[in-house]
Image: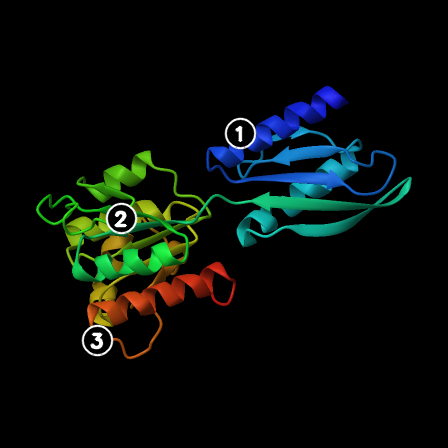
Amino acid sequence: MAETRASIYRQFEEAVRAGRLVAMATALTGPAIGAKMLIWPDGKVSGSLGEPALDAAVRERAASCFAALRPERLTVSTAAGPVELFIDVQPPPPRLWIVGAVHIAAALVTYAHTLGFYTIVIDPRTAFVTSERFPHADELIPRWPDVVFAEAVLDENACVVVLTHDEKIDNPALAMALRSPARYIGALGSRRTHAKRVAALKALGLEDAQIARIHAPVGLDIGARRPEEIALAIMAEIVAVMNGKMK
């Protein structure tokens, strides 16, 4: 048992260090008190809580824990009596993927950094996505965003904002993001622009339920006009979604 727990702790530490979303379930009471099991978002598990019913209960509850990115304590009835379990979710730092190296993006990176986000700015227009314009971004990627997203991990801790106003850049990027479990997806543009975008995304094979995930027009309605104000409205909306105050 000691070796098994040591292995679980090691896997847990490796996942956290690598920035991978993972959860550890622990039996707080019952015959197997102290038993641990790791759970990943794809359903993979390592270890056991000592009884199939407990393992199954954790697998079932883990999905909601991952979606909320919050720990949870629960009680499961077993033949030996009720057993208390604790599911500890360890999300990596949230990542903000910004498509479009525009003025709004520069302010958005500033706000996101203040809130602990890892920031990535993507734009195939190499003249825009430069370290001179974005010295504070964690990553600058001068490539087409849909290609980047095809290679990246857009998980439950990822937020995506598209800002270019260029449908050749924005729409393929949105199509990729909408097929992922990214926690927040927002797109700049008027309601008329978004109506055209919806038609284009349907032509790319997206379903209504997927397209409905887009926050558009992006950002909370605070009467924003300047790039800095629009960035603030976007960041406020992201925080509201991350904190479960809106979908």
**Of the numbered discs in the image, which one, if any, rests on residue 137?**
2
Q: Residues within 10 Å of mark 2 (few under 14, many from 20)?
A: many
Secondary element at image label 1: helix
- For residue 83, which quarter of the picture? top right
Q: Residue at x 34, y 37 (%)?
A: 152
How far is mark 2 from mark 3, CA to CA? 23 Å
User: Along the polypeptide, which appears first: circle 1 or circle 3?
Assistant: 1
Residue 115, image x, y percentages:
41, 58
- Which quarter of the figure is the N terminus placed in? top right
How far is mark 2 from mark 1, CA to CA? 26 Å
Mark 1 lies on residue: 14
Q: Residue at x 39, y 38 (%)?
A: 153
Residue 27, image x, y percentages:
77, 40
Secondary element at image label 3: loop
Q: Residues within 10 Å of mark 3 (few under 14, many from 20)?
A: few
Residue lying at the far right of the rendered structure? 80
**Of the numbered discs in the image, which one, if any, rests on residue 194?**
none
- For residue 151, which quarter of the picture? top left
* Left or right placement of residue 101 versus residue 175 in this view: left
The colour scheme of the drawn protein is rainbow
Q: Who is closer to the viewer here, 73 or 183?
A: 73
Q: Is the residue 66 above or below the residue 241 in the image?
A: above
* Left or right placement of residue 104 versus residue 94 in this view: left
The count of marks equals 3
Q: Who is closer to the viewer here, 113 or 40?
A: 113
Q: Who is closer to the viewer here, 16 or 147?
A: 16
What's the residue type where badge 1 is placed? Glu
